[in-house]
Image (cartoon, grey):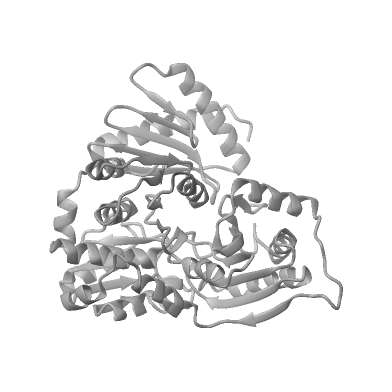
């Protein structure tokens, strides 16, 4: 049992009833209401069974600090943030644990008009929370509440009107699509998108009751049902969302699941064929993006892992696209947050424009193999200490054949491969990602790194 919630760049998360309780959510909401000076805040939630509980705790904090709360209901995370932008709100709170297991939940913060908090704003919010320096409203100045229930149609309108989308061309192709929403928030919007695009759609796990019938994170291992349905139905493509639909991953027309790295790679190749400009990715995103960027004559800017860091860098370099290897892509013409629903539209247009199958498109792109492992750690504090010890060790051992990148954790880079060690911001684990020309080489990099970490962990008093 974890005694404390995990506070990260994306917000606050924990296991409900263990590391996350209503008091914590209320305190953070009091802090956020104070942070936005009691102005307008948009709230929304994913489909988790604990989300209604957290919603009441969020309302308590916001109303107590005099906020005008606009509740958009059960929506995807990108929909909620887009509504904050549409309504010109001073902030938003999304109730979600995104890709975490069903027993987890949390809240994610954005500031004015759906913009993710920058580092200075995060520090200010956390200071208010830690010092409990809330500004409470008098009995006759408490906050107000209203509901809006057309958020999904507004989000869809933005997607369908985007410059690079030719709705008629997709409708004429009559693509057969299998959609697996994982019983999450994508269930209330992505089926409508496919309907608008004239696709023959088959739905799997698209009832948003929060009883996830597969893991919320759509890894290749988790979406075997989708893979089988694509093969049996002879579909053109399969899509799978995570719990709040800010991500989407792909199953090819051959029923082969692709990692989230391919989502950003496909979208980058498509968008950069329509417009020119630099792109932004995290340090642990595949080097396939570097090859795509070279193909189109643009640069890739690398950041720490976390959507907030990617967004900050996108603003700095005026990027046309941003994202992570998780299946999350950011479309600045719509909003500065990862948007799995918009990614479905972009990839369908990519297929139609290319006159290829998704398997054919994958075959034409450069390939590397990635390995992802994680080491369970007793606490975030121990994880931080272990990364620090590992950093000292690798600094002492690094020679001219290895570049040590300390942008986020420790990334060791060779000419044709890399391995990254970093403390997770959402779980008490250390993540080890590697990429190499072959599966065997990528797995060996991960295995050697984990062996070193386990050895160094013995030096820490647990």
Occupied quadrant, residue 169: bottom left
- Residue 371: give x, y in percent of width and height: 33, 42
Q: Is residue 183 visible?
A: no
103 or 160: nearer the viewer: 160
Which quarter of the rendering shows the C terminus?
top right
- Residue at x 61% of width, y 59% of height: 111
- Residue at x 19% of width, y 64% of height: 351
395 or 210: nearer the viewer: 395
Asked whether, in this view, residue 155 is left or right of residue 13, the answer is: left
326 or 373: nearer the viewer: 326
Which quarter of the rendering shows the N terminus?
bottom right
- Residue 302: give x, y in percent of width and height: 42, 40
- Residue 441: give x, y in percent of width and height: 26, 34
Q: Vertically, is 17 above or below 145? A: above
Q: Is residue 49 visible?
A: yes
Q: How many marks?
A: 0
Q: Vertically, is 288 above or below 251? A: above
- Residue at x 48% of width, y 17% of height: 396
- Residue at x 44% of width, y 70% of height: 212
- Residue 421: give x, y in percent of width and height: 45, 36
């Amino acid at each position: 049992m974890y005694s404390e919630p995990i506070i990260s760049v994306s917000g606050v998360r924990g296991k409900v009833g263990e590391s996350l309780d209503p008091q914590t959510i209320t305190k953070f909401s009091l802090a956020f209401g104070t942070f936005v000076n009691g102005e307008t805040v948009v709230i929304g939630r994913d489909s988790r069974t604990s989300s209604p509980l957290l919603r009441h705790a969020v309302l308590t904090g916001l109303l107590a600090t005099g906020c005008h709360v606009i509740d958009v209901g059960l929506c995807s995370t990108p929909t909620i943030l887009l509504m904050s932008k549409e309504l010109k709100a001073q902030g938003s709170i999304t109730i979600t644990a995104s890709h975490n297991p069903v027993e987890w939940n949390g809240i994610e913060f954005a500031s004015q008009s759906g913009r993710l908090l920058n580092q200075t704003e995060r520090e200010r919010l956390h200071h208010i929370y830690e010092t409990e320096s809330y500004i409470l409203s008098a009995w006759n100045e408490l906050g107000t509440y209203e509901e809006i229930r057309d958020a999904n149609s507004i989000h869809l309108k933005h997607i369908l009107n985007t410059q690079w989308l030719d709705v008629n061309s997709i409708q004429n192709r009559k693509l057969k699509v299998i959609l697996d929403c994982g019983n999450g928030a994508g269930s209330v919007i992505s089926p409508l998108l496919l309907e608008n695009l004239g696709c023959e759609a088959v739905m799997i796990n698209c009832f948003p009751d929060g009883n996830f019938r597969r893991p919320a994170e759509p890894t290749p291992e988790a979406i075997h049902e989708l893979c089988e349905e694509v093969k049996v139905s002879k579909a053109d493509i399969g899509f799978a969302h995570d719990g709040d639909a800010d991500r989407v991953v792909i199953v090819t027309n051959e029923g082969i699941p692709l990692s989230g790295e391919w989502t950003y790679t496909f979208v980058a190749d498509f968008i950069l064929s329509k417009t020119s400009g630099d792109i932004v990715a995290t340090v642990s995103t595949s080097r396939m993006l570097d090859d795509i960027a070279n193909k189109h004559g643009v640069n890739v800017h690398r950041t720490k892992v976390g959507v907030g860091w990617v967004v900050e860098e996108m603003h700095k370099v005026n990027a046309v696209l941003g994202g992570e290897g998780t299946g999350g892509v950011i479309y600045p013409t719509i909003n500065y947050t990862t948007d799995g629903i918009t990614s479905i539209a972009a990839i369908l247009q990519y297929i139609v424009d290319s006159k290829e199958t998704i398997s054919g498109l994958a075959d034409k792109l450069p390939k590397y193999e990635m390995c992802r492992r994680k080491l369970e750690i007793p606490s975030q504090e121990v994880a931080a200490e272990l990364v620090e010890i590992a950093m000292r060790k690798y600094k002492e051992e690094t020679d001219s054949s290895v570049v040590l990148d300390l942008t986020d954790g420790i990334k060791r880079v060779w000419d044709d491969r890399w391995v990254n060690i970093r403390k997770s911001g959402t779980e008490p684990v250390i993540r080890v990602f590697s990429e190499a020309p072959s599966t065997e080489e990528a797995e060996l990099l991960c295995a050697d790194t984990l062996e070193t970490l386990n050895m160094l962990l013995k030096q820490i008093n647990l």
